[in-house]
Amino acid sequence: MNTRWVNKKKITLRSWMGAAGLSLLFWGVTSCREILEPSPVDLLVDELVLNEAADVQPVQLGLYNAFRGIGAPKVIAGDFTADYIQHNGTFTVYNELGNKQITAANDAAAALWGAIYRAVYIANFIEENIGNVPGVPEATRTRVLAEARFVRGYANFVGAYTYGGIPQVTTTDVPTNRNIGRASQEAILQSVLADYQAALPDLPETYPNDRITAKTFATKNAVRAALARYYLYQQNWTQAEQTATEIINTRLQSLDTSYAAVIFQEYDSETILEVAYANNSNDDPGTATFGLNNVLVGRREVIPANPLVLKLLSTNSGTRSQTISFNSTQQRGNDNGWTVRKYGSPDDANNNITLFRLAEIYLIRAEARVRQNRLTGTNGALADINLLRARAKAPNASFNTQENALLVIEEERVYELSFEGHRWYDLKRTGRIQAVMSAFSPNWNQKYELWPIPQSEIQRNRALVGAQNPGY
């Protein structure tokens, strides 16, 4: 992007991300070994200017750059907080997550918070300014605004289900954002729904003849997928089923015949939206994909927990056991020798992070149908589950009670979606977290149903003083 001046005044990341200081931690910016080590730094964002039509694309790309920064820390929140991993390295951040001793100083909690508000800020910037830029075609104006609203909705959705109530940042005004308290989780989620509903009409169904753009830029199916997940979390079973069915019926995505494509390919046929990283991502601000690869494969700071290994090796998992691999030379001490394979290095063909894919949509529809007590038949949950089982070359499932069906779906989400950032959120929304996590770790505490508000943010934003989540 071109560096520009805004009113001849430098705008820094820390100054404009002021909901709670909202500083951005770099993951892997300088070296693949420095995952969460560097301290927060100020970044010049003078390129955020919308004065003429030529400014629109750089700001749009800045929005997606911020958006992809949510990817890796959200995977860490969703899967490292839960029962998927055990600590195997030296970094405190992962020791806290693996041993269920999370503190308000945890760097992952601060990194996700910063990524969320970086995305929210740029979305607000677009919303405030794009209507005043001369020479922008109306179709471009409405599409970019819709993209901004989708990104803001997604960021706030992740924030609300990770931290509970969070500051509702609706402006780019620095003094306002430097002193803003927590809104309720309900208020944040209402804004999420409003943003998704506003974005949906103005986004394209797809980008014909451009497979990569269609999977890395927001489309109608990306918003529908976000809405289906939203309705599932809100227990609006009718809308969850209906929205999932709309996505499936577009036939814009299809299940790959082999589950290996999910693990080892980018832009595969079932991806709805993924965040992409270039091979030169060393200079990529935010969270570079090789951060996950280094944590899971290079340094192996965390490894698949033994109970998860047993689940993935079960007959019902089928070929989805390829999510992990075993090396006997690494098996020593507490190291079980297993490694996650879903994230390659920047030079591999699987270094992107999937946000939405078709298999999740089938699982959403299956669960919504079970909750409506439609278990079998043409429009029953079992057909959707067995479609995924067939793809994974696993035996067909069977169930005849709602309770049993829900447990089958819970397990199916483990087989299908491991290390895509769902498990902790799934256990919370289904009310299963205390039973599962207490059995998994003697250190589990109910307070871990939410991540802590980062202590650094409370220190920067006086409106957050005394507003920490219980127990931290």
Image (tube, rainbow, N blue to C red):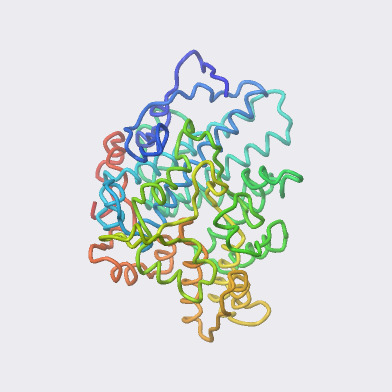
| Residue located farthest toward the bottom when viewing the structure as drawn | 400
Is 21 or 35 nearer to us in this picture? 35
Percent across and percent down for residue 177 are: 40, 33
* Whether residue 413 is situated above or below residue 102 in the rendered picture: below
Left or right: where 79 falls relative to 442:
right
User: Residue 331 appears in which quarter of the rendering?
Assistant: bottom left
**Which corner quadrant holds the N terminus?**
top right
Percent across and percent down for residue 131 are: 64, 30
* Whether residue 114 is situated above or below residue 271 in the rendered picture: above
| Residue located farthest toward the front when viewing the structure as drawn | 329
Q: Is residue 371 visible?
A: yes
User: Residue 372 appears in which quarter of the rendering?
Assistant: bottom right
Q: Residue at x 43, y 71 (%)?
A: 311
Left or right: where 158 falls relative to 182:
right
Q: Is residue 467 visible?
A: no
Percent across and percent down for residue 465 are: 26, 41
Q: How many marks?
A: 0
Percent across and percent down for residue 230 are: 53, 58
| Residue located farthest toward the right when viewing the structure as drawn | 209
Q: Residue at x 58, y 29 (%)?
A: 59
| Residue located farthest toward the top when viewing the structure as drawn | 8
Q: Residue at x 54, y 57 (%)?
A: 263
Left or right: where 265 falls relative to 211:
left
* Whether residue 300 is situated above or below residue 147 in the rendered picture: below
* Whether residue 175 is situated above or below residue 233 in the rendered picture: above
